[in-house]
Image (cartoon, rainbow, N blue to C red):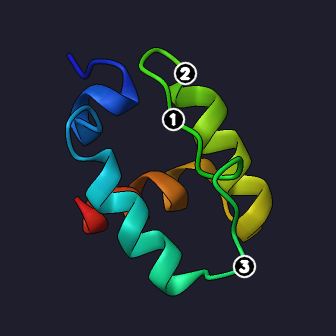
Amino acid sequence: MKGHVMDKLDLKGKWNVMKGKIKQQYADWTDDDLKYEEGQEDELIGRLQQKMGKAREEVVDWLKSLG
């Protein structure tokens, strides 16, 4: 059984490094765009979906590639 989508991503502890990589790719994104708090994964994915104009699965795959 697959768990919550972010269980597979394991952002906890990696987010600062991932955020740095994202800022290199998208220099115009703000800290608010990339705000992540434990338990708020769905909100983060939603914001990234809006910024990128991509489907949720595409955003999740992209985040996995950064981690």
What residue is disc 2 on? 40
Chain-order first, disc 2 or disc 3: 3
Q: CA distance from mark 2 to mark 3?
A: 22 Å
In the rendered image, which quarter contains the N terminus?
Answer: top left
**Circle on res. 28:** 3
Image location (x, y in percent) of residue 19 = 42, 60
Q: Amino acid at mark 1?
A: Tyr
Image location (x, y in percent) of residue 35 = 59, 41
Apparent side of residue 11 relative to residue 41 in the rendered image (left or right): left
Q: Residue at x 65, y 54 (%)?
A: 48
Q: CA distance from mark 3 to mark 1?
A: 17 Å
Q: Residue at x 22, y 46 (%)?
A: 14
**Residue 12 sits above or below residue 51 on the image:** above
**Residue 37 sits above or below residue 31 on the image:** above
Give the crowd class for mark 1: few <14, some 14-19, many >=20 residues within 10 Å: some
Give the crowd class for mark 2: few <14, some 14-19, many >=20 residues within 10 Å: few
* Label 2 element class: loop
Give the crowd class for mark 3: few <14, some 14-19, many >=20 residues within 10 Å: few
Apparent side of residue 46 relative to residue 65 in the rendered image (left or right): right
- In the rendered structure, are the residues bearing label 2 and label 1 in contact, judged by CB atoms less than 8 Å apart? yes
**Circle on res. 36:** 1
Q: How many marks?
A: 3
Q: Amino acid at mark 3?
A: Asp
- In the rendered structure, are the residues bearing label 3 and label 1 in contact, judged by CB atoms less than 8 Å apart? no
- Pick the front one: 35 or 9: 35
In the rendered image, which quarter contains the C terminus?
Answer: bottom left
Apparent side of residue 14 relative to residue 25 in the rendered image (left or right): left
Q: Amino acid at mark 2?
A: Gln
Judged by depth in the image, the label closer to the viewer, 2 or 1, is 1
